[in-house]
Image (cartoon, grey):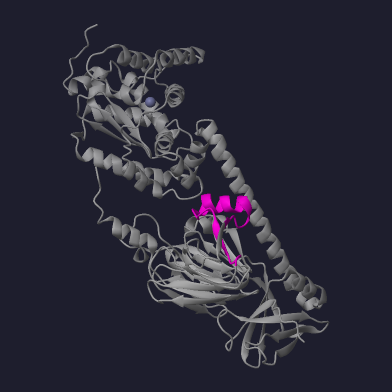
Amino acid sequence: MVESTPNALCFGDEFPASGAPCLVHVEDHGLTITFIPDRDGAEPRSESLRFSELTVSAGGLDHDQLVATWVGLKGQRTLYLKSPDVIRAFRQAAPDHLSQPLERAAEQVRQVRQRHRMVWSIVGGALLVVVLGLWFGSDVLVELAVDRIPVEWERKLGESTYHDFLAHQDVMKDGPAVDAVNEMIHRLTGQIPENPYTFEVTVVKSDVVNAFALPGGYIVVFTGLMKKAESGEEVAGVLAHELNHVLQRHGLERIIKQLGFVAVVSIVLGNPPGLGGMMKQLGVELMTLKFGRAQETEADLTGLELLYRAKIDPSGMITFFQRLAEKDEGRVEWLSTHPMSNARAERLKTQLAEMPKQNPEPFTFEWTKVRASQGAPPSTPP
Amino acid sequence: MKSEILYPGAFPMVRVELAEGEHIKAESGAMVACSPTIDIESKMEGGFLGALSRKFLTGEKFFFQTLRASRGAGEVLLAPTVPGEIIVMELDGVNEYMVQKDGFLAGAAGVVIDSQMQSMSRGLLGGEGFFILKMSGKGMLALNSFGAIHKIELKPGQEYIVDNSHLVAWSTTTTYSIEKATSGWVASFTSGEGFVCRFRGPGVVYIQSRNPGSFGAWVRQFIPVSQ
Ligand SMILES: [Zn+2]
């Protein structure tokens, strides 16, 4: 009586697509394959194969099956062996010329196993990050997610918002104000090493006191903000601050924080393009993203350094920030997205005091003329 | 144990006859009716952690039910939640199948159900969650689909591309890679990314003729949204 528990599947033209169950025995000279009869009482059919007839590789869903192919009387046949015992017996009995592909196959299986273990540890690690992230206000996760987003994609995100916004604004194409802002941006960006962004700046005619930078490097300055400034250095201070929100990718961090946990996980694990749709669904607006305290401080300090490197007097930044915060004349939009605090100005002052003195290089424009070109009074009353 | 599909087509049921002492595993909620000799036990297949991981990672119900003919022979009637075909196959100990989480309806006692983690990219991009069910062992296995079930037979080396959300089950002798669907594959009202699986034989792939996700999206457009 032949033992009839199959341990392999045989594929070939005359067999069903799911394979014919068969029993494989490993002998000294090769394999004996016994096909299990479909019907009870039918005679089992056996076939003997020499090792020299076989080609061996690893296959199956997890690459952990031994696949042996040979050309029989009825065409090509493929055998899928899964049982570890049979595979081991095969490897022991097979001659040298077969042992090499077999070892490779075994190595592949080992690699797959190892990869699985690695994937598991990554999953475990990710879970740990998730737990830690939740514990520590999810900043770790947010950073991980932000790192996964390519600059190119960030540009696309900012670009569409930028153009949508400008479509409804009174854009200043040229004139002293535009020239002045371009000069400031040029001086500042010239001091950014390995800058992956191409900054684009637009001056918008509006009394709103505001300026913002979108992810990807799109900057908008309102004439209202320029009218409030008493020098080009003050405006440059705001721009240096904004540039650093872009460079530090603060916008992305905020978006991801607002979209929450699911977004973070999906980005960390590899699906950044889904973010745009998610933002639309949840109504996250790039322009009204409010930055956090830590981000403001970071943009302040890096902005201050940038001004310093560009040889633009950094004290303008500090005085302007303080004036914007103190004087309560009209709504200063900029403050609603960049929350100001006394601590911020103090921190900047301390930082500036620690920097070695240098002689700033003035801008080529005259600020009074720039302001006059926008219809502001030639000088501000004290 | 004997099983029979009643009312084949869109609204089928499976009748399983159990001898005294026999039992089967069924998707919880699949039971429609049974003889008074049948006891229902909720059992966590694959242990507590296995069940828990299924629950959280594939959204699969926490328990499979065990239907046991403990007080004499009897029969059970089982049906899936969604309209669609049922197929019954016989596992022979060597044929193994991966089954998408909603595809399992019932299995004989000898059928081993494993929650298997898909490799990271497969699982995430494939949309089946981290885990799918691996069916091995011996005995009757009933799968259900949304719509009709179609069997694709692949010769060694033969390839076939299937929209991921139409997958029901595939034999473990196949290999597959996940690819992003080109726009033609994705229905206009489904948002998000579509993925297709490129299968390579030998083996069989069972697919369903309807896509649950697309159907859901299609239905949603008729549901008035309350403000
Ligand atoms: Zn800021």
Q: Quarter holding the N terminus of chain A?
A: bottom right
Q: Position of residue B101 (x, y in %)?
A: 50, 61
Q: Is residue A90 left or right of residue A271?
A: right
Q: Which residue is situated farthest in the right direction here?
A: A28
> On the image, which quarter does residue A166 sit in?
top left
Q: Nearer the viewer, residue A23 or A147?
A: A23
Tell me if A204 is positioned left or right of B35 in this view.
Answer: left
Ligand 1 is in which quadrant of the figure?
top left
Does residue B165 appear anywhere in the picture?
yes
Query: In which image quadrant can residue A382 be found?
Result: top left
Q: Nearer the viewer, residue B215 or A97?
A: B215
* Residue range highlighted in magenta: B42-71
Between A119 and B64, which is closer to the camera in this rendering?
Answer: B64
**Residue B198 seen from this side:** no
Q: Is residue B60 magenta?
A: yes
Locate residue A172 relative to residue B104 in the image: left or right. left
Image coordinates for residue A184, horizontal then vertical, percent: 34, 27
Q: Is residue B18 magenta?
A: no
- Residue occupying the far top of the picture: A382
Residue found 29% across the figure and 41% down from its top: A161
Which residue is found at the position 74% from the left and 69% from the top? A84
Figure check: A345 above or below A115:
above
Q: Is residue B56 above or below residue B33?
A: above
Relative side of B107 to A165, left or right: right
Residue sitting farthest toward the left:
A375
Residue A74 place in picture, x, y as percent: 62, 92
Residue at the spot x=56%, y=37% of the render? A131
